[in-house]
Image (tube, rainbow, N blue to C red):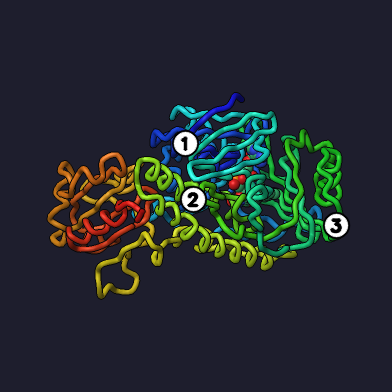
Amino acid sequence: MTDVRTDVLIVGAGPTGLVLAADLARRGVPALLVERAQELFPGSRGKGLQPRTQEVFHDLGVLDAIRAAGTEYPKMRVWEGAEPGQEWDMVKRSEPTDQVPYANVWLIPQAATQRVLYDRLRELGGEVRFGAALAGLEQDGSGVTARFEDGSTVRAAYLVAADGGRSTVRRALGIGMTGETVDPKPMLVADVRVTADAPVPDTHWHVWPKAPGGGVAFCPLPSDKGRLFQLAAQFTDESAGTDTSAEAVVGLLAARTPLAPEHIDEVVWASGFRARAAMADRFRSDRVFLAGDAAHVHSPAGGQGLNTSVQDAYNLSWKLAAVLSGAPARLLDTYEEERMPVAADILGISTRIHRAGRDGAPVQRGEEVQQLGIGYRDAALTRETREGLADGALRAGDRAPDGHVGGIRLFDAFRGPHWTLLTFDAAAPEAAGGPESGTGLDAGTFDGILELRTLRLPGCAAYGSGAFLVRPDGYVAWAGESAEGLRAYLTGLLTADPA
Ligand SMILES: Cc1cc2nc3c(=O)[nH]c(=O)nc-3n(C[C@H](O)[C@H](O)[C@H](O)COP(=O)(O)OP(=O)(O)OC[C@H]3O[C@@H](n4cnc5c(N)ncnc54)[C@H](O)[C@@H]3O)c2cc1C
């Protein structure tokens, strides 16, 4: 790589980096995504997409491809040796509604998700520079200079560390990770292709909680190349090393399950880890931001890691794009302010689910893992100007729900880099106008910084009355009943930082 300049340097082409790069490409922001490996990650590890992530993927235009490459979660089947026994459902299933169109977690191997995101990035004109390993960085008042292992440099206005749990960027900045070991027992995760006659039907996620040496789970994965399963095995011996060789994985399955070595066609990928819950002490150092696993790591129990990472990227991308277009730099402070409490909550949820499920106890995962309740009611960007709201009313800071109103699907209206002003019934601010008209606000104020679309709609029970300004990442930024209130909010948002 020769020495280059860009607006945003993204380090790491995992889910975080790919979502960020695709969304910045969609916004026309010059960005460079670099990846140490020579190719995309090949394993299945983060295989559950929660409802909120599916909504983000709808907005990013990849949900159809994600649905085509995945499937619903199967039920669990508990075995004792070669004896299949009780069945239970880990997923608390719900029917989709008008407000929550994707009601259940969706099973898709992480590698397939990354492939879909990569294809979308390329469709939007972006690329990944593979084989580019960041070695260090320096920053000053106007930008960041990143050094690569091959001696080249990149100069960028901002850098985003999407380089995973062992983040080189985080270490280079000296930002600590504070946390704890969730479980001292080592785990092995592997993708295993089995023969057509292997005695594990694709209809179930098979578990052997009392297997000799430690519990085993074997989950069927959607695959267009034969029968693929994700193996997760625990070692009761805390000092055990996790041997990730194909021989060791085959030997483990033969020793702990009814599968014989001849049932295993191929060990596609394997990795070992110990469950930890830890969070970076800061998510920002001046012009550098930490996102995804670089900012927080936790147990895979509850399927939160990839999902939280995608949403970090979605929270940050529109803010970076706005500031690079001229919005005040303080907008970037709100990334850490909004995402740190979310990460702290996720750490607690994953640790609780991990510990509750130790020794194979059947733990059903409910609404707390779906990430639909995440919001920013108390954040600096949020303004609720209405008073006397009923309990349970939609408020500024909440996720903006979907719905079909006046022949329009709201998620389709939100889709894209713009902000959306929704006004419902007679209480709408007079400045909002109809779908074709402007906001009535000084258009110049927003020119080149934020695009605002307005929709005047008949009433919608999920929203209630009033007007709702929806951020590009799908949260209600402002709710109120007067054009003056809206004008004051937007003016405040875009007023330059004091010199
Ligand atoms: C064993 C295991 C099981 C998991 N199971 C689940 C699950 O069931 N559900 C779930 O939601 N999550 C799960 N996760 C978590 C999920 O995989 C992660 O949260 C997700 O991959 C984080 O994405 P990321 O892009 O932040 O980081 P990563 O996916 O780790 O990507 C970081 C990228 O940065 C690259 N990189 C690193 N250093 C450099 C450098 N110096 N220069 C350039 N590039 C660099 C890496 O090669 C990598 O491609 C699991 C994780 C593990 C380890």
Q: Earlier in the sequence, mark 1 or mark 3?
A: 1
Q: Are marks 1 and 3 in contact (CB under 8 Å)?
A: no
Judge from the rendering whether residue 222 lies leftward or rightward of residue 217; answer left or right. Answer: left
Which residue is disc 3 drawn over? 213
Q: Residue at x 81, y 43 (%)?
A: 244
Which residue is disc 2 drawn over? 311
Q: Position of residue 29 (x, y in %)?
A: 42, 35
Determine whether the residue tagged by mark 2 lies in a helix, strand or loop: helix
Disc 2 residue type?
Gln
Of circles 1 and 3, the one toward us is 1
At label 2, counting other C-alpha atoms closer than 10 Å, the crowd grade (few under 14, some 14-19, many 20 or more) is many
Disc 3 residue type?
Gly
Determine whether the residue tagged by mark 3 lies in a helix, strand or loop: loop
* Disc 1 CB within 8 Å of nearest ligand 1 atom: no
> How many angstroms separate mark 1 from mark 3 (CA)?
51 Å
- Closest to the observer, 307 or 161: 161
Which residue is disc 1 drawn over? 7
Say if 420 sits above or below 302 in the image: above
Task: Ligand 1: give its quadrant.
Answer: top right
Disc 1 residue type?
Asp
> How many angstroms separate mark 2 from mark 3 (CA)?
37 Å
Q: Residue at x 59, y 53 (%)?
A: 295
Q: Earlier in the sequence, mark 2 or mark 1?
A: 1
